[in-house]
Image: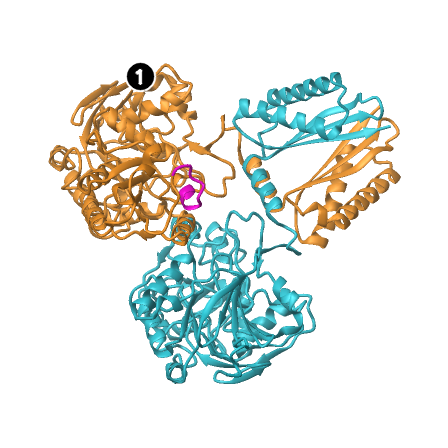
Chain colours: A orange, B cyan
């Protein structure tokens, strides 16, 4: 009875960051006036976000609650989960926890940043860490990067289980299979809420084991006795890189590693002993042409067709050491990320045109669980509340449908959006609040100084270029001292458009004369009239709408 | 013996236009000083071609040989085969030949253009037309647009067989199956060269019949008794539209047609009697909300996620008449064209978020032949020379491999690039020449006035915006009368960057003072020094590289 009037204790779950993928880049768990941060990653801009390098989560809520933040726990070392740490750690002096490979990649990032004071705490798979009122267990999973973990976060209200990015791999390359027995044990004891990876929720069946790729690679190597072999893959997939090294070793080929991020990851993984490479297999890039074709394997970045990557430069003949030639075999151990298909095709065409054979077949598997695996993990954990994360809306929807079909009550499934605040206890769960969290765009050194207005200007400039009109007036008299001078960029070839630009000059003079007759001497007003008249004239003549910038200068 | 010293008569094949898809937009057949033009289409710009609307074939070679051009023959009415006619016909007064639906769509285009004098000659499937030394037979095929034809072009040297875009459909919706018997007959008589559609040359098996989509649609309609049904598809696929109307009629639903191009094509197809719709099925868009949900079908554009399309506007709530609501069923009777996946996903997410159910399954088939069909047609025609067309390099390569596996001698397979001149006779074939044919970019009314320099400027502007410095000098003295004024767009929020812009002003003054001390009075040189100093300053401060435009004005 003493409890009656008191509010029951609740735990809050707040996904922040992630562009259109909910709960990917950062998730907050809040309880007892303490906030635990899960992951701290970046999103990558769409082609409409002109000139933007990265998108980081909005830290406003964390800033307002600076004293409550107890620390960051990381599920794995992919950019979308660790990439924002250099931005985060320059503001927040809190400890970061992760497994060995994850932290080695974080350390790499931090070395390149200006932040010098930070604390990284390495955990072993299976460890439990206490941070304020939270105790967090790091549980082994499988994914396309090594030492990935799920998190069992015990809060004063109950256990929050976060799968991280995962798949079920019974025969992984490194570190053993996902710890399903521990999942089952936690499920038996009772889990309040589960956040689960939705990337492949639309895909039926099972995701294949990483080990199958190794077999495929060996088959392809077998069939390529006379070729130089070039394998393009994701730099962060260290287990894939390991398998390429293994295939090379089995075929007595030397390996050259190319591409900045590939070189980075391989040397990091070697340093911490995660990669296992016989001493004499890897050779230096400058020696690549010292060996016959059938004794060389090149592992490279560029599997997404990135125009500046090592593979693209090899294909276009712009690489310092390697040019593609007839007989080369290029294996894409990868799949185009949606939106990159055209760039990838472009590189494939270029490779083929140089005479290379390009191979795709089965040389890649996904790192994310398909429907049967998602159902398996749900069936083991059996949480009271289910929260699909790490997916676009359609993926979350597919995941929700899947879990609902297994009998989970629909009212206990929460499809959240960035900034939603979900409050839970053992009795009820509901979204009680929402923070507006605009994406923070990073352009060069600028964080958040490019927003919608700047992007709108860039879009306008990108489509039709610009026209500048410079007019110098005499102070007091309003007479023209110089100009109108017209400068254009990205609009038309100036050489071929003298008539058009002369027409513009005439339009400007007409507007100016008319303004003078009306005794208008408000420069802002004159500029607007010039702009409107020019816009109309140019649309009529060219059906284009460049940005028009009248600049009026006054001299005395 | 009389022949010995004389050159044997040859026929030339010259693919022009088509960006990275060879032989798609326009192909020239030249013999006896006469040129036949096959198709006259546009390519669509990649995302790197900022602000470009269309790309048309380069007509330079045709201009230089104006008197030789005998006419244009069209294979079908898709934009990539007819879209450049308004540009072509304003220069070339030659007759155009095509089937009824093709010409009706051409007529539509010409009405919207400023060209008033042109001759369109309608042919029936099966007709033969004589143009100069060429006689051209129009032979029925199947494709994703009605009344598509292959062309058997009899030249003085032999028969050139051009498949056009095709598939083999034994149960088409309209007009009967591809005329394989005639193909076989021509093959028996002997074909010198075949140009064949390579779009699906990487795809094993057979492409399904268009009719299978009708069955799928009926199934979905059966399962959607209470829903408003919205079907998004390609406007030009009139047979698809016919099947949607049929399904609606069978389910006693009224049909509303939405989207400019959809309305255009439907009314054109109705006018020429190609579409067969009962009088009372189609209703006006303004009446769409007069009927209950389960009595309405909306056919709409936007299946590629185009941001301004009717479907996107319905999804975002910006459409005048229709907003998506819970219970709506949206059928994508389409497949994303490579490069559009992200836009399509964006629309799907938006539709789902409004509560619509989105359906993809089997509601689309390709209009292009898969490997078994390609082999069938090759096996019937058995040409001496084989030229894979209508594909990126990788498609042409796959098609070549396929035909080589059937025993075609590899030296008689020609993988051409735009501008190659292939000379053939019954004895030899070789690429004897190559014309450099730069793509002609269309931006608004401008044809070819946007080239690499303009595009490079647009790219630069799009990524980092621009900074303008205006400096007004006194003639003779070289003293500053006004400025430096600094204007920026698409670079940084001006409000938040006063310090930075003040820094720019300081840099400009320092450079200017230094120039003055060195008695430098070459404005061009001063501008370059200002630009270089500002570039360095801005890179240091922001790691960005905006376009920097110093403008110096002189007053007396």
Q: Secondary structure at mark 1?
A: loop
- Among the 4 quarters of the image, the one containing residue B327: bottom left
Q: Main secondary structure of the magenta part?
A: loop
Task: Report the front residue among B70 and B220.
Answer: B70
Task: Report the front residue among B438 and B25.
Answer: B438
Q: In the picture provided, is B509 more to the left or to the right than B189?
A: right
Asked whether residue A14 appears in the rendered view, the answer is no
Q: In the picture provided, is A274 more to the left or to the right than B485?
A: left
Q: Chain of mark 1?
A: A
> Where is mark 1, residue-wise?
A119
- Among the 4 quarters of the image, the one containing residue B412: bottom left
With respect to residue A481, does B230 lie above or below? Answer: below
Total marks shown come to: 1
User: Residue B91: x percent and y percent?
Assistant: 68, 67
Residue at 70% across, 45% down: A494
With respect to residue A424, does A529 lie above or below? Answer: below
User: Residue B535: x percent and y percent?
Assistant: 59, 27
A146 part of magenta stretch: no
Circle 1 packing at 10 Å, graded few (<14), some (14-19), many (20+), is few
- Among the 4 quarters of the image, the one containing residue B470: top right
Q: In the picture provided, is B158 more to the left or to the right than B326?
A: right
Task: Report the front residue among B144 and B42.
Answer: B42
User: Residue A289: x percent and y percent?
Assistant: 34, 38
Asked whether residue B84 appears in the rendered view, the answer is yes
Range drawn in magenta: A312-321
A319 part of magenta stretch: yes
User: Residue A11: x percent and y percent?
Assistant: 28, 28
Dividing the image into 4 quarters, which one contains the C terminus of chain B? top right
């Amino acid at each position: 009875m003493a409890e009656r009037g008191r509010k029951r204790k609740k735990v809050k779950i707040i996904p922040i960051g992630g562009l259109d993928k909910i709960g990917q880049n950062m998730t907050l768990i809040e309880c007892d006036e303490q906030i635990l941060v899960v992951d701290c990653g970046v999103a990558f801009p769409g082609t409409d976000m002109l000139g933007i390098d990265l998108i980081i989560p909005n830290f406003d809520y964390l800033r307002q609650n600076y004293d409550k933040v107890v620390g960051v726990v990381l599920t794995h070392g992919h950019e979308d989960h660790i990439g924002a740490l250099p931005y985060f750690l320059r503001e927040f002096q809190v400890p970061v926890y992760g497994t060995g490979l994850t932290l080695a990649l974080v350390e790499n990032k931090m070395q390149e940043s200006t932040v010098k004071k930070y604390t990284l705490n390495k955990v072993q798979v299976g460890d439990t860490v206490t941070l304020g009122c939270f105790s967090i267990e790091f549980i082994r999973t499988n994914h396309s990067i090594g030492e990935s973990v799920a998190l069992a976060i015990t809060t004063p209200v109950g256990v929050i289980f976060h799968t991280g990015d995962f798949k079920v791999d019974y025969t992984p390359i490194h570190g053993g299979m996902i710890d399903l027995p521990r999942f089952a044990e936690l499920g038996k004891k009772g889990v309040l809420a589960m956040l689960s990876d939705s990337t492949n929720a639309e895909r039926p069946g099972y995701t294949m084991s990483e080990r199958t790729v190794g077999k495929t690679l060996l088959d392809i190597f077998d069939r390529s006795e006379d070729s130089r072999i070039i394998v393009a893959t994701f730099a962060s997939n260290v287990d894939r890189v390991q398998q390429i090294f293994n295939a090379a070793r089995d075929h007595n080929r030397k390996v050259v590693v190319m591409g900045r991020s590939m070189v980075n990851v391989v040397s990091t993984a070697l340093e911490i002993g995660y990669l296992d490479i016989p001493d004499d297999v890897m050779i230096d890039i400058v020696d690549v042409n010292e060996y016959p074709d059938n004794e060389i394997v090149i592992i490279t970045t560029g599997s997404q067709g990135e125009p500046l990557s090592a593979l693209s430069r090899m294909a276009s003949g712009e690489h310092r050491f390697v040019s593609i030639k007839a007989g080369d075999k290029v294996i894409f151990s990868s799949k185009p990320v949606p939106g990159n298909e055209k760039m990838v095709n472009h590189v494939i065409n270029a490779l083929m045109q140089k005479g290379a054979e390009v191979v795709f077949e089965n040389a890649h598997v996904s790192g994310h669980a398909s429907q049967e695996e998602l159902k398996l993990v749900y069936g083991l954990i059996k949480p009271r509340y289910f929260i699909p994360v790490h997916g676009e809306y359609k993926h979350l929807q597919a995941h929700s449908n899947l879990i609902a079909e297994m009998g989970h009550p629909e009212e206990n499934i929460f499809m959240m959006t960035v900034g939603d605040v979900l409050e839970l206890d053992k009795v009820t769960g509901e979204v009680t609040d929402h923070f507006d969290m605009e994406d923070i765009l990073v352009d060069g050194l600028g964080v958040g100084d490019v927003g919608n207005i700047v992007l709108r200007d860039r879009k306008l400039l990108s489509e039709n270029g610009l026209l500048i009109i410079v007019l110098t007036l005499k102070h007091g008299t309003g007479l023209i001292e110089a100009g109108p001078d017209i400068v254009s960029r990205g609009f038309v070839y100036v050489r071929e458009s003298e008539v058009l630009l002369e027409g513009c000059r005439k339009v400007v003079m007409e507007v100016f004369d008319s303004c003078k007759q009306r005794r208008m001497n408000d420069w802002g007003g004159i500029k607007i009239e010039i702009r409107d008249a020019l816009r109309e004239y140019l649309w009529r003549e060219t059906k284009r709408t460049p940005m028009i910038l009248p600049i009026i200068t006054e001299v005395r």
